Image (cartoon, grey):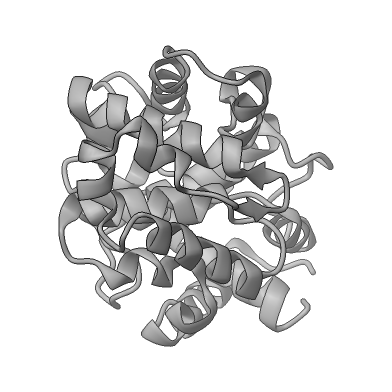
Amino acid sequence: MALSFSALKTFLNEKAVQYNTPTFIESDPIQIPKRFSKKEDVEIAGFFAATIAWGNRASIIKSANRIMNLMDDAPYDFVLNATTKDWEGVTPFAHRTFNTIDLQFFMRALQHIYLKHGGLHTLLSPTSKETHMDQAICRLRQVFFSIEHPQRTTNHLANPAKGSAAKRIHMFLRWMVRQDKNGVDFGIWDDISPSLLSCPLDVHSGNVARKLGLLSRKQNDQKALRELDNSLRSLDPKDPVKYDFALFGLGVFEKF
């Protein structure tokens, strides 16, 4: 689909407006953190919902609600105060390959992060010299796995340093950082510029981006993410990931 820059920008802006509405929440995992109002509850609920966000979306939402129930529907209080007995009580759990062992460790790691490192917001805040969020994700990952952990759990937090596009964590960052006037994204990390965000790159958004000439690389990896970053930032340097709504909507809802 060959469009001029101006026509492409107009088209994607229209699609972003079409899908960036509260009705988007009804079938999206973002509805899990939407259950909460306290900043830390939103962060933790969103982190878990994003962590398991692969596969059928109805199944993701069901599993994420199950995690919230296991945390007594008070994720921040649970993370701060849980004991070994509490962690052992969060069983059985399974969502795809994310199982009870992974869930128990993620709860322990988050407790360590909130008690010792200022929380997810602090760890994922970029330095003034960083032009995207990958370095912050790597810092989070370093602290996350600095405590004793089962090796299998490292598969569930993407590693940009090894070339991952880190789709799920970038989706979480969109939720937390992006200033959304339409009531979908939270924008509670308002000290981080939305201009640094990357579009969550998956099969749907990648295929649509290629058809529109925004992306040429065939693999959905970090190199492709940088290419897509450049394309979307040329369209809107202040809010490039608003186009996630356009690419997702075109791919999932319109089978573009």
Q: Is residue 170 left or right of residue 221?
A: left
Q: Where's residue 104, x and y in %?
A: 48, 37
15 vs 126: above or below? below
164 vs 68: above or below? above
Looking at the figure, which quarter contains the N terminus? bottom right
Q: Where's residue 52, x and y in %?
A: 58, 52
The residue nearer to you, when weighing 245 against 66, is 66
99 vs 248: above or below? above
Task: Give the residue at the far right of this rendering.
Answer: 218
To which quarter of the image does residue 116 belong? top left
Residue at 40 percent of width and 64 percent of height: 69
Looking at the figure, which quarter contains the C terminus? bottom right
Task: Give the residue at the far front of this rendering.
Answer: 85
The residue nearer to you, when weighing 80 against 82, is 82
Q: Is residue 140 left or right of residue 99?
A: left
Residue at 49 percent of width and 45 percent of height: 170
Q: Give the total number of marks visible in the rendering.
A: 0
Residue at 40 percent of width and 67 percent of height: 32
Q: Where's residue 122, x and y in %?
A: 22, 30
Q: Is residue 134 left or right of residue 161?
A: left
The residue nearer to you, when weighing 191 against 14, is 191
To which quarter of the image does residue 178 belong? bottom left
- Residue 177 in view (yes/no): no
- Residue 242 in view (yes/no): yes
Q: Where's residue 46, x and y in %?
A: 38, 55
